[in-house]
Amino acid sequence: MKKTILFLLALIFTSSIYSQIKIGLNAGATYSKLYGKNVYDSPGYKGFLIGASFEYYLNESLSLKTNLNYERTLLFDDISLTDKFGIIIGQVELTSNFDYLNIPIMAKYEFGNSKKFFVNGGPFL
């Protein structure tokens, strides 16, 4: 009996907040380039992103949105080793993985007649 009551309460609670909360999945390819001291110029870094998104509607047009994303950026590059005269003496294949956990916290404003246009903005960790 307790399980039935708890189930009904959970069903009522989730149906009452369902219209205010949106949950989704994120997936995609990434392409980035590193800059800075001691970083050589190389082709872009390819990788992937996978995560979940949570959106809470404050009113019809304004919501708070956050994601929890795991992002991996991959670097594949060939480096030529040269001697002091500039003669190539060997090749090295370089493979590196850069793993990130991204947590953006954004305000989302929807506009337009059918609410298909929106603007996001906010910080991320």
Image (cartoon, helix red, strand yellow):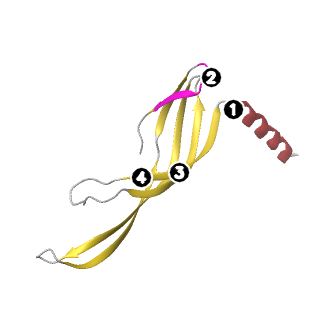
Q: CA distance from mark 2 to mark 1?
A: 22 Å
To which residue does mark 3 refer? Answer: 28
Query: Between disc 2 and disc 3, whose residue precedes?
Result: 3
Q: Pointer 3 and pointer 1: residues touching (CB < 8 Å)?
A: no
Residue type beneath disc 1 = Ile
Residue type beneath disc 2 = Ser
To which residue does mark 2 refer? Answer: 114
Q: Pointer 2 and pointer 3: residues touching (CB < 8 Å)?
A: no
Element marked by disc 4? strand
Q: Pointer 2 and pointer 1: residues touching (CB < 8 Å)?
A: no
Residue extending farthest bottom: 89
Which mark is drawn over residue 17?
A: 1
Q: Position of residue 125 (x, y in %)?
A: 41, 45
Residue extending farthest front: 87
Disc 3 packing (10 Å; few <14; some 14–19; many ≥20): few
Q: Which residues are magenta?
A: 113-120
Query: Between disc 3 and disc 1, whose residue precedes?
Result: 1
Numbered disc total: 4
Q: Position of residue 121 (x, y in %)?
A: 44, 32
Disc 2 packing (10 Å; few <14; some 14–19; many ≥20): few
Residue type beneath disc 4 = Tyr
Query: Between disc 4 and disc 1, whose residue precedes?
Result: 1
Q: Which image quadrant is residue 84 in?
A: bottom left
Give the residue drawn at x 45%, y 52%.
Answer: 30
Q: Is residue 13 visible?
A: yes
Q: Would you say 95 lies left or right of 116 here? A: left
Q: Is residue 72 visible?
A: no
Query: Between disc 2 and disc 1, whose residue precedes?
Result: 1
To which residue does mark 4 refer? Answer: 31
